[in-house]
Amino acid sequence: MRTATVERNTKETQIKLTLNLDGTGKCNVKNPIGFFDHMLQAFCKHGMFDLEGTLAGDLEVDQHHLIEDTGIVLGQCFEKALGNCAGIYRSGIFIYPMDEALLRAAVDFGGRPFLVCEASLTGVPLVSMGSNGQESSFQTDCFEDFWQGFVANAKCNLHLDTLRGRSDHHKMEGLFKAAARAIRQAVEIDPRRNGEVPSTKGVIV
């Protein structure tokens, strides 16, 4: 099984995640940010990844540290679980329609981190009611921070584009789902490759 566990403890965040690339889409992560939990649930469901663990951090400061560091740890899980990337398809692309929004993700696990994020978000926080009856929000400017942390540590390049859309909720959720589907394509085993590294160099660097 292609699995990995990564733990990151700093003065700002305490994060531990276990990833199974060949899972069934289960997400069991203790996550204090409601909308972010919704995004990770969607990512696992559409990528068919199993993810479990705990997220904690200095939310009294803001959400940036926890969301970015979660991207870092998840990226490290992917890099560790993929190893030398032998036998995988390596790249993937998916276009996801979500009501009025149309979203595209393209990824390549080629060893060179790069993020292009054209999500076209308004920057206005999404406001909801927490389970404790108190108002809570999601800082939409942290969306790109998460993916930047992910690509830098998964050592992939990822393009995220909102082709059209009105709702920030739909744009972000659709991009998480599109990314999950593209990443799923990329990391699946290609039966025709016979375990070889998918690069003319013979190595992913």
Image (spheres, rainbow, N blue to C red):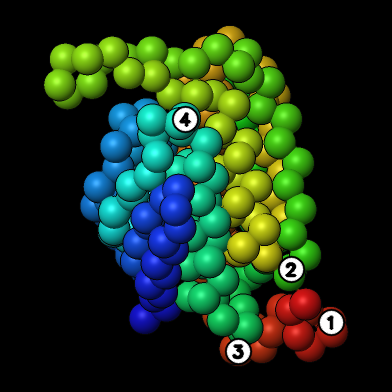
Q: Earlier in the sequence, mark 3 or mark 2?
A: 2
Q: Earlier in the sequence, mark 1 or mark 4?
A: 4
Q: Amino acid at mark 1?
A: Thr
The quadrant of the image that shows the C terminus is bottom right
- What is the C-alpha distance between the residues marked 1 and 4? 44 Å
Q: Which secondary structure lies at badge 2?
A: loop
Q: Earlier in the sequence, mark 2 or mark 4?
A: 4
* Residue where numbered disc 4 is placed: 62
Is label 1 or label 4 in front?
Answer: 4
- What is the C-alpha distance between the residues marked 3 and 4? 47 Å
Q: Quadrant of residue 21?
A: bottom left
Mark 3 residue crowding within 10 angstroms, few (<14) / some (14–19) / many (20+)? few
Left or right, residue 17 beside residue 64: left
Residue situated in front as seen by the camera: 149 or 118: 149
* Above or below 7: residue 189: below
Q: Residue at x 60, y 45 (%)?
A: 147
Q: Amino acid at mark 4?
A: Asp
Mark 1 residue crowding within 10 angstroms, few (<14) / some (14–19) / many (20+)? few
* Residue where numbered disc 2 is placed: 110
* Residue where numbered disc 3 is placed: 194
Q: Amino acid at mark 3?
A: Asn
* Above or below 167: residue 200: below
Is label 3 or label 4 in front?
Answer: 4
Q: Residue at x 67, y 58 (%)?
A: 152
Q: Earlier in the sequence, mark 1 or mark 3?
A: 3
